[in-house]
Image: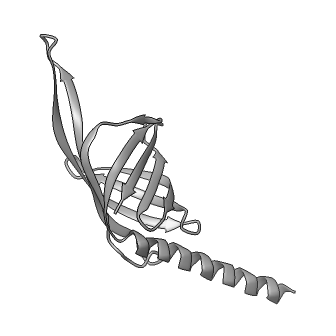
Amino acid sequence: MKRLFYFLGCILFCFSCNKNQKTVDDLEGEWQIKKWQRNGNDVPFAKGTYYFDVCENKKNDCAGQRSIDVVESYIDLNGDSYSEIVTANHSIKYNVSELGKEMFLSLLIDSTSEIFTYDCDILLDENTFDLSFINQVGDVESFLLER
C-alpha cells in the first residue's frame, strides 16, 4: 500500500512539472498588453509588451522583459494640465508553479535598480494570457495580454 501511494505521488509530481514546463514553453515570445487594470479601474497606457524567454522551469528562473509606455498627467502651478508618455522598462525573472496556474514574478526597474516580487495568478490559452497580482502597496493589478 505504501508503494502504491509513493508511485501515485511520483506520477502526480511528474505531471505537475510537465504542466509547469508546458506553460513556460507556451509563454515564450512577445505578448502585447491589451488591458491594464488596478483595483478594477483601467490604467491609461499607450502601449506595452511582455517578452518571455523559454527555459527549463525547474532548474532556474526564466528571464524576460516588460516595457510599458505609461500616460502621466500633470497639473502645473498655473493650473494647466498636460500629459506625457513615459516608457518604463523592466527586466523580469519568473517561475511557473501550481500546475501552470501560478507564477512567481520578479521585476527589476531598470532605471532605479529596484526589485519587486509578486505571486501571480495566471490563466493562459493559445492567444491570451491573464496575469494578476497584488502590488507593493496592496492594489490588485491585472493585465490582459495577447499574441
Q: What percent of the width, then of the height, locates residue 48?
A: 26, 51
Along the horizontal axis of the image, is 4 left or right of 15?
right
Q: Relative to 47, is 100 on the left or the right?
A: right
Is residue 128 shown above or below 86? below
| Vertical side of 35 occupied by 105: above or below | below
Identify which residue, 31 or 60, lies in the foreground.
31
Residue 135, horizontal then vertical, whole percent:
43, 42
* Residue at 46%, 37% in the rendered image: 139
Q: Position of residue 129 (x, y in %)?
A: 43, 59
Q: Quadrant of the N terminus?
A: bottom right
Q: Quadrant of the C terminus?
A: bottom left
Give whichever of 132, 13 is nearer the camera: 132
Q: Residue furthest front?
A: 127
Task: Using the image as rendered, state which of residue 105 and residue 34 is in the foreground.
Answer: 34
Q: Residue furthest left?
A: 78
Counting the numbered discs, the total is 0
Measured along the vertical axis of the image, is residue 45 above or below residue 81? below
Tell me: residue 147, above or below residue 10: above
Q: Residue furthest right?
A: 1
Q: Residue at x 28, y 56 (%)?
A: 49
Q: Which residue lies at the image location 54% right of the left edge and 80% below the top edge?
A: 18
- Residue 44 lies left or right of residue 122; in this view the side is left
Colour scheme in the image? one colour
Side of 119 relative to 46 (left or right): right
